[in-house]
Image (cartoon, rainbow, N blue to C red):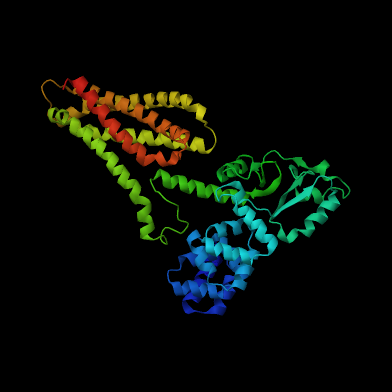
Amino acid sequence: MPPEAEEAIVTLRDSIEARDGSAFLKTAEEIHYADLAAVYEALDEQDDREFFLKNVSPERFSEVLPELADNLVEEALNQFRPSQQREILEATRDDDLVDILQDVSDKTRARLLGLLPKEDEELTRTLLNYGEDTAGGRMTTKIGRISTDLTVSQALDALRADLEDTETLGRIIVTDDTARPVGMVRLRDLAFNARDSSVSDIMRPVEQSILATADQEEAANLVLKYDLIILPVVDESGRLLGAITYDDAMEILEEESTEDIEKIAGLTGEQSEESYLNTSVLIHFRRRFVWLLGLAFLAIGAGYVMLRFEHVLDSVFLLSLFLPMVIAAGGNTGGQAATMVIRAMALGELEDGNILKVAWKELRLGACLGLLLAVCIAATVIFVLPAFRPTLPQNVSFPRLGLSVATALALQVTTSTLIGALLPLFARKGKLDPAVIAAPAITTIVDASGMVIYFTVVRALLGL
């Protein structure tokens, strides 16, 4: 952040603390709306937030509102009079307006919809019919659109009439007489071509579009993959409804990646859009406790395995030295495999039909990793461990011990890699989120399986 921007934020905070309305209003006009939203969210005292909302202009706040965390939207809007709320809503982009209305209660949504002009109300109600995680729920209808039968001059006149309501003119969508998107032109294409040229002669064909009912992540991935400025959104008949812009795609990918990271870490519930420090302890508690409790009970299974093989440890207590290493190696390799597969799935590189290919690939990779680790551990047990003079039963030698531990390690790494790779694929096939069964679940599963493998192998090879 530039030094002058940081100074402005400090000045704004000082004006809030001093309750200096004129200084606040002047500084608020100079600060970027995203920074204004961050300042508002960072305010701890209710009096400070009320002062902020009382002194910020509705026009300026219409830029700040879409940047606020979901749970702050309704509280902030209710601080304004109905006339000010109308002004804020009318100045908000239609896709942001839908997001805002999805974040408030049903009663407040109905009241806010009633404040909108009739045409805007009908459009907003239509957009609200699409789920908030769909392309239709995230699209904007304020796009540049022209028809194929226009000349360049006519197209410029049509765009000029809608200039104030158009969000982007970086790419202008061309539709046919049935409102289906058939091409795109850039504003400079219109500016530097002869005025009597036909739009159909200078447009480029539309290569990508997406259904309004499609998942928002699919739309964002299309924008990213094909370097699109806008992605047309269509209905089941192929008619143009709106578009996903590149900035919408960036927000979607940020939300989806955050959601996946939290699920991989074993966090449940809706993600909080507030910063870490501003999210209450109770919310953090609710999101962590369920997974921790479930995994705790699942881990009892690993303890039961150890209980069943207690006599093995009693016979050769030195085996306990290598048990954590074998278990951890399985958890690490399983987590790595799961991460790679989930990433490939998110990028659209893997389909349900690729399960056998993934299994064969990860089986070979796991075997290679397991064998190399096994050789290293066997060498350590055979040549390094004797220097510490540990006690072994008479019928167990260091070479036999090294071979047993190495074999168990190789099998554990191989099977854990295979489990980590296949669980996300089977989860998706079962209509579950692959990220949900990632790190914590895989670690707990391979802990139990690792103990079974370890004790079974060493008992067989050492004759215990």
Spot occupied by residue 146 in the image (x, y as percentages of width and height): 78, 49
Res. 33 in view: no
> In the shown orientation, is residue 36 left or right of residue 322?
right
Seen from the viewer's position, the closer of residues 169 and 5 is 169
In this rendering, is residue 99 above or below 387?
A: below
> In the shown orientation, is residue 420 left or right of residue 24?
left
Res. 220 in view: yes
Q: Residue at x 47, y 35 (%)?
A: 428
> In the shown orientation, is residue 174 left or right of residue 286?
right
Residue furthest toward the left?
394
Q: Residue at x 60, y 59 (%)?
A: 97
- How many numbered markers are drawn? 0
Q: Quadrant of residue 125?
A: bottom right
Spot occupied by residue 154 in the image (x, y as percentages of width and height): 85, 52
- Quadrant into which the C terminus falls: top left
Seen from the viewer's position, the closer of residues 340 and 178 is 178
Q: Residue at x 68, y 49 (%)?
A: 242
Seen from the viewer's position, the closer of residues 362 and 88 is 88
Q: Quadrant of residue 263?
A: top left
Seen from the viewer's position, the closer of residues 435 and 370 is 435
Spot occupied by residue 143 in the image (x, y as percentages of width and height): 70, 53
Spot occupied by residue 155 in the image (x, y as percentages of width and height): 82, 51
Residue furthest toward the right?
196
